[in-house]
Image (spheres, grey):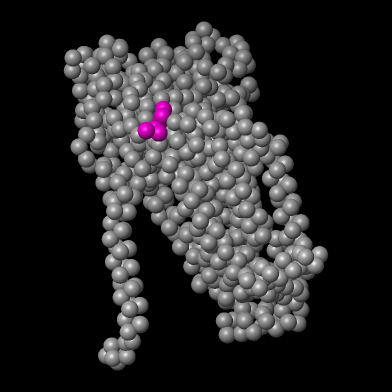
Amino acid sequence: MSNETTLSRRGLFMKLGILFNGCVAAALAVPIGKYLLSSVTRGRAEGYLSWVPLGLVSEFPEGETRLATFRNPHVGPTDGKTADTACWVRRVAGDQFQVFAVNCAHLGCPVRWFPQSGLFMCPCHGGAYYRDGSRASGPPERGLFEYPYKVGNGVVTIQAGELPTPGPSAELIQIEGGKEKPCA
Amino acid sequence: MRLISQIGEWFDRRLQLAAPIREAVEHPVPRNTASWWYVFGSAALVVFLLQLVTGILLALIYVPSAGEAWSSLQALNHDVTLGWFIRALHGWGSNFMVAIVLIHMMQVFLFGAHKFPRELTWIVGVFLLLMTLGMAFSGQVLRFDQDAYWGLGIGASIASRVPVAGPAIVKLMLGGPIIAGATLSRFFTMHVFVIPGMLIAFVCLHLLMVLRLGINEWPVPGRIVRRATYVAEYHALTKKDGAPFVPYAIWKDLFFAAFVLLAVAACAIYFGPFGPTGKPDPTIIQTVPKPDYFFLWLYALLSLLPPSLETPALLIGPVVIILGLLLLPFLSGEGEKSWRRRPIAVLTVLMIAITLGTFTHLAEYAPWSPQMNAWSGEPVPVRFLNGTTALERQGALVFQAKQCRNCHALGEKGGRRGPDLDSVAVRLTQDQLIRQVIQGGGNMPAYGKNLSPAEATALVAFLETLHPAGQAAARDASRDVVLREGQ
């Protein structure tokens, strides 16, 4: 209690000054924090994942897997070509498709399709996948990422907008190696 | 001359810096620290200054925009006078800086300089190492090419594995849902403002402590560090056997710094700038991304770890390593300084150096990566086809056409993902070959669905011819018996 009794006027002003600065800093921290975290908080906003057309059904022959590209639904002013994305489209039969992300489920390198051996191979760490996207060999712990798709008016559309990563993020469907696939 | 000294006095009356600077440069150091072993810290500082200067020069031209960065690097390489040289200096300076910081750290550890009372100097040094690595990685991103783009994808894939917070960390790191303009902008901010600012502050702190606490004396076996007596002993040593840092010790620092700068410049002229490789266009997937030299060991580790260990190793490993480095001076803050009496310290350094060196060496030719063009680019060596039947030759065709070669070498050419097949017939019998091809296993995909029975028969027939001339192919010993009994 002795502190309170010996608190001088100047000492009080200094403490008030520090408190005042603390309040202003806290008030400013809110908008700064919101600004810094905007890329995270924006994530669940409406339309973040959007339906993007890939092309006519007729462009994808039955039983084959073709590379298709699309423009990411969210494009920034300085994105340039980086907003273009590639994906592997497998037309199983009729309107039945599988659309795979090119990103390897191990660490995201672009996998290539080899129709002769029916394998996707990753150039980085040697991950390999079968034609249905399930894991064949190498370090990936799961199959390729798959985009949800729709077919309407003869056009294939996929739901895209996020970089697929092996963490729990992706809204994309997970294919367990060797098991029945949940979609398509 | 008088005029200059008058001007000097005018400034010093106002700045009052001459006395403390003189005190700092003339502070006594133990004579035997004027050694070529003590030059790495100052060399790291000089290379850092080179990076600051060349970095500012590059920023005159470089455009941190995902759409234009690559073109601005091309302009630096080809259009701007000596732009390639400044880029090369910055790139090689980065490699030299990481190398010198690592050597400096190793020397400090082996000379026991992390012990009392220099614990905080070591801790600040650990942060300086982390920042140096952060600069190296963010710099690689700023060289916005295919390697940078896919390198970011790898970074995002690693970050995404953090439990619960993973997706948020990925978006925070990328500045959005994908690798794009915002990603480059924030790595630019880190590389140009945030980390260099912190580096400058921490370097000042590091230097201040070196000056205040004195440079570590040359370790003598048997001279034990004790908290109670060390400071007095050190002062007695510098008093008895000390010499002013300038000029007694500094000339070696000056010579080595100049030599390092010359070496950076020589590498820059001889080898030129790093990249940029192909355009950072995600629709061009014919690329084999590889990290820069000092992250190659990590590339190797990520390929060689068993999948189940990967995520724990990625998430827990760095924390353990950094904590270990930070706690080191508290765990061994006293005792012997000399490496001659610290065998475990020497062995630890050797083991880390050999491990990192081996991983780096492996990553340079990446035996775990399939060679994506081997199947169409590397013909089957003629000696494997001489005297073969039509069926076996058909098998060789299947072998190439089904991309087996991407993972299996023949005659030293082809992928190394799987075993070389030059003598596979010695290792596996016909039945085992059929089983391996059809069902896969080990680390090989199953080809059952992608080979017709005729193709499989031909392929196995070819594989059975792959054995050295004087060595017979492996046979199932029970087969003859079974066949005989069946007759």
Q: Which residues are magenta?
A: A77-82
Query: The C terminus of chain B lies in which quarter of the figure?
Result: top left
Task: Using the image as rendered, state which of residue B480 and residue B292 is in the foreground.
Answer: B292
Q: Is residue A118 above or below residue B198?
A: above
User: Residue at position x 33%, y 32% from top?
Assistant: A75
Q: Quadrant of residue A61?
A: top left
User: Residue at position x 61%, y 39% from top?
Assistant: B87
Q: Is residue B444 magenta?
A: no
User: Residue at position x 30%, y 14% from top?
Assistant: A60
Residue B73 lies, in percent from the top left, at: 55, 33
Task: Using the image as rendered, state which of residue A96 and residue A47 is in the foreground.
Answer: A47
Residue B113 lies, in percent from the top left, at: 62, 69
Q: Quadrant of residue B119?
A: bottom right
Query: The N terminus of chain B lies in which quarter of the figure?
Result: bottom right
Task: Using the image as rendered, state which of residue A66 and residue A18 is in the foreground.
Answer: A18
Q: Is residue B198 above or below residue A97?
A: below
> In the shown orientation, is residue B167 left or right of residue B148?
left
Task: Using the image as rendered, state which of residue A116 and residue B477 is in the foreground.
Answer: A116
> In the shown orientation, is residue A130 left or right of residue B61?
left
Residue B158 lies, in percent from the top left, at: 39, 44
Q: From this viewpoint, which residue is outermost toward the top?
A: B390
Q: Is residue B473 above or below residue B148?
A: above
Residue B275 lies, in percent from the top left, at: 57, 33
User: Residue at position x 53%, y 70% from top?
Assistant: B120
Q: Quadrant of residue A81?
A: top left
Q: From this viewpoint, which residue is outermost toward the right?
A: B1
